[in-house]
Image (cartoon, rainbow, N blue to C red):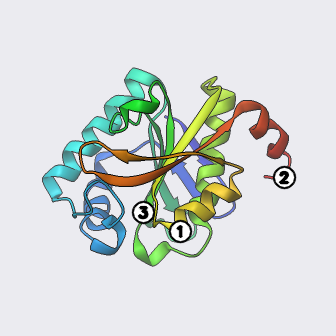
């Protein structure tokens, strides 16, 4: 099992025990307003997504990391390296994304976890470029992308939902130049 620790977080491959706390995150309208079509997900939809996330590790060698608070052991959310199939115009690509429970917002956890995932993607998975996609109104995710050294690539629309998104990217060279500051 792939696992990383920072001073505050544990990142590990997801397990079945993550279902209930992940379902709670996915059921929160504040969390989901910028995701997909903006609606919450049911427990069954979450279970299906968790099963796909676990399978992705076997198929691709990367995927979703569960983010756990070291001090309390609480599931905070996830950070992932995955294929953004919902936006075919940028494929082939690997996207870094994150989703944290509302109570964990504003503490730097998304940035901290995403830095670990970026390093894993570039150093262990051999990726040359990683993108991140946000709803154009999601300013909090834009701030995380900026802190990660990602730059704006384009604005477009998700075909399935007609929602406007901004695509940001970082390549291996830019990551290597910034890595010393992580």
Find the distance from the CA under tag 3 to the CA under tag 1: 24 Å
- The residue depicted at 13 percent of the width and 52 percent of the height is 44
Mark 2 lies on a secondary structure that is loop
User: Mark 3: which secondary structure?
Assistant: strand
Circles 2 and 1, Cβ within 8 Å, touching? The answer is no
- Residue 121: x and y in percent read 61, 33
Where residue 73 appears, as percent x and y from the top left, is: 48, 65
Dot 2 or dot 1: first in sequence order is 1
Q: Quadrant of residue 63?
A: top left
Q: Is residue 179 above or below residue 36?
A: above
What residue is shown at x 37% (from left), y 37% (from top)? Answer: 87
Query: Badge 1: few (under 14), some or many (20 or more) residues near its Cα, within 10 Å?
Result: few
Mark before the other along the chain sequence, 2 or 3: 3
Q: Which mark is residue 139?
A: 1
Mark on residue 75? 3
Query: Picture coordinates of residue 178 (x, y %)?
Result: 81, 46
Q: Report x, y in % for residue 3.
A: 56, 42
In this rendering, the answer to whether 153 lies above or below 112 is above
Helix, strand or loop under label 1: helix
Callout 2–callout 3 Cβ contact below 8 Å: no
- Mark 2 is surrounded, within 10 Å at the Cα level, by few (under 14), some (14 to 19) or many (20 or more) other residues, namely few
Q: Is residue 169 left or right of residue 85?
A: right
Position above or below: 108 against 17:
below
Left or right: 64 as drawn, with respect to 32: right
Crowding at dot 3, Cα within 10 Å, few <14 / some 14-19 / many 20+, comes out as many
First-in-chain label (3 vs 1): 3
Which label lies toward us, 2 or 3? Answer: 2
Residue for badge 2: 181
């Amino acid at each position: 099992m792939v696992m990383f620790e920072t001073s505050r977080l544990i990142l590990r491959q997801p397990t079945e025990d993550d279902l209930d706390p992940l379902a709670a995150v996915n059921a929160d309208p504040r969390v989901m307003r910028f995701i997909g079509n903006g609606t919450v997900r049911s427990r069954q939809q979450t279970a299906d997504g968790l099963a796909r996330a676990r399978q992705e590790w076997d198929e691709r060698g990367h995927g979703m990391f569960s983010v756990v608070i070291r001090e309390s052991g609480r599931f905070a959310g996830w950070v992932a390296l995955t294929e953004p199939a919902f936006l075919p115009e940028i494929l082939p690509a690997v996207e870094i994304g994150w989703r944290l429970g509302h109570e964990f917002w504003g503490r730097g956890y998304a940035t901290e976890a995403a830095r670990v995932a970026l390093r894993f993607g570039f150093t262990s998975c051999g990726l040359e470029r990683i993108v991140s996609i946000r709803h154009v109104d999601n300013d909090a995710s834009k701030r995380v992308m900026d802190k990660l050294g990602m730059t704006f690539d384009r604005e477009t629309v998700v075909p399935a939902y007609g929602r406007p998104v901004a695509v940001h990217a970082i390549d291996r060279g830019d990551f290597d130049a910034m890595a010393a500051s992580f």
